[in-house]
Amino acid sequence: MTVGHRLKLAILAAVMVAGVVVAATVDIPDSTSIRDSVSAAGVSGVLAFMLILAALTLTPFPMSVLTVAGGLMFGLVPGALIVIVAATFGAWAGYWLARSLGRASFAQISWSRIVALNAVLERRGMSSMMVVRLIPVFPFGLVNYAAGLSSVRQRDYLVGTAIGIVPGAIAYSAVGAYGTSPLSWPFVAAIAAVVVIGGGSAVLARRLGVTGSIRGNQTPV
């Protein structure tokens, strides 16, 4: 397990402990009350959230935070579906933004990371795209731009993205959906799912040679 994965597991453990402390000391609104407030906004509220999420996929903002928010506001299944659709749309926009503007427009991005990521994506296409989306090796937005600057086909990119983000979307949406009851079994199960996905994706990445390719292709910036 890499240092990044160990750090992520430590953060998740800290979140669980913090949730227990908050639940014991603070009067938290229940999830039904929160969703009733959100549903009052109707379709416009859903569309606004989707547009915000899609726009933020073009930035370094962590997708996990947005996914937890989606689960909290819309529930597990609706939240996960909304996140998957919005994130895939945002990823498509980032892909074509990079294709349209070209490498010169992204001079501030670490090119050693772009080269490393391109080496992975161009070797296996769709399957590598799925793995890269599943594991927390690169920020979501960086993957969008790197894929757009690479030779990865749009079909492989979109299908790989849509499939690759499903496990994380479900797990993190569950964290948000049950987060107002951090002592409940569904919340504990959601946290466990996040941990399992993180560990499983690390093993899968090693078997497919993703992490090795990244280390082998990175150069000092």
Image (cartoon, rainbow, N blue to C red):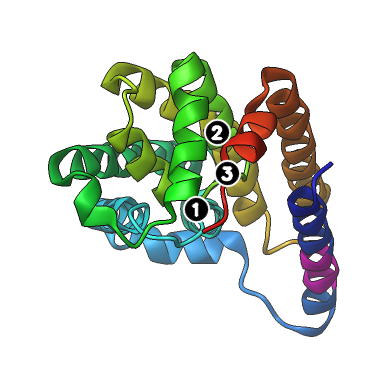
Query: In this orientation, does residue 188 appear?
Result: yes
**What's the mark number on residue 22?**
none
* Amino acid under disc 2: Val
Percent position of residue 191, x then y: 77, 49
41 vs 145: above or below? below
- Say which residue label 3 marks: 218
Residue at 72% from the left image edge and 43% from the top image edge? 194
- Say which residue label 2 marks: 132
Per the image, label 3 sits on a secondary structure element best described as: loop
- Say which residue label 1 marks: 63
Which mark sits nearer the N-terminus, 3 or 2?
A: 2
Which mark sits nearer the N-terminus, 2 or 1?
A: 1
Q: Are marks 1 and 3 in contact (CB under 8 Å)?
A: no
Percent position of residue 85, x then y: 35, 36
Closer mark to the observer between disc 1 and disc 3: 3
State the separation of the CA atoms marked 2 and 1: 14 Å
Per the image, label 2 sits on a secondary structure element best described as: helix
Residue 44 colored in magenta in the image: no
Query: In this orientation, does residue 140 appear?
Result: no
Q: Is residue 154 left or right of residue 112?
A: left
* Amino acid under disc 3: Gln
